Amino acid sequence: MSELLLTTFAAVLIAAGCLFFLAGTIGLLRLPDFYCRLHATTKCDAVGAVLILLGVALIAGADTQTVRIVALIALIAISSPTAGHALARAGWHAGHRPWTREENDEPE
């Protein structure tokens, strides 16, 4: 694979990861309740981080750093859903109830 094609593909992966981070941030700011915000941030941040790390791994090439990057990807793939579940469960036990349109939708 040519160096230019590899660098271009890595740049596309990194840009896609940044877009996922942006989508998660917008979801955090715009969604109505704790659970919707939690869903947006955990999913988008995990996918965004994995895409960025894959792009960095392509740029790094076959090196010892690539092994570390793959280990980080595995850690993110395991810890992000687990942390999201733990936060949602803690929110439920703390009394946060899901948002419903019927209860909270006030006409302007």
Image (cartoon, rainbow, N blue to C red):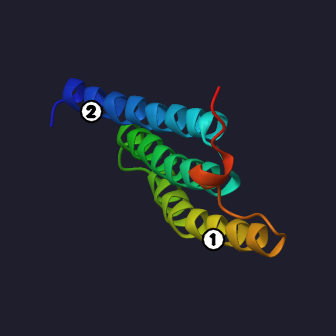
The type of residue carrying mark 1 is His
**Above/below status of 60 relative to 75:** above
Locate the N terminus by quadrant: top left
Mark 2, residue position: 9
For the C terminus, the image quarter is: top right
User: How many numbered marks appear?
Assistant: 2
Element carrying mark 1 = helix
Label 2 SS: helix
Please say if 27 is above or below 40: above
**Who's the residue at 39% across and 39% down the image?**
55
Residue under the point 36% across and 50% down: 62
Place of residue 92 in the rendered image (x, y in percent of width and height, measured from the top left): 74, 71
Which is more toward the observer, 53 or 46?
A: 46
Q: Position of residue 89 (x, y in %)?
A: 71, 74
Residue 4: quarter of image = top left
First in sequence: mark 2 vs mark 1: 2
List x then y, in percent, for residue 37: 63, 48
Measured Cα–Cα span from mark 2 to mark 1: 33 Å
Residue identified by numbered label 1: 85
| Residue 22 falls left or right of residue 6 | right
* Three-letter code for the amino acid on which mark 2 is drawn: Phe
Between 20 and 6, the one nearer to me in the picture? 20
Frontmost of labels 2 and 1 is 1
Q: Which mark is residue 33?
A: none
User: How many C-alpha atoms fall within 10 Å of the one at disc 2: few (<14), some, or many (≥20)?
Assistant: some
- Placement of 61 over or under 76, stated as above or below: above
Image location (x, y in percent) of residue 30: 61, 34
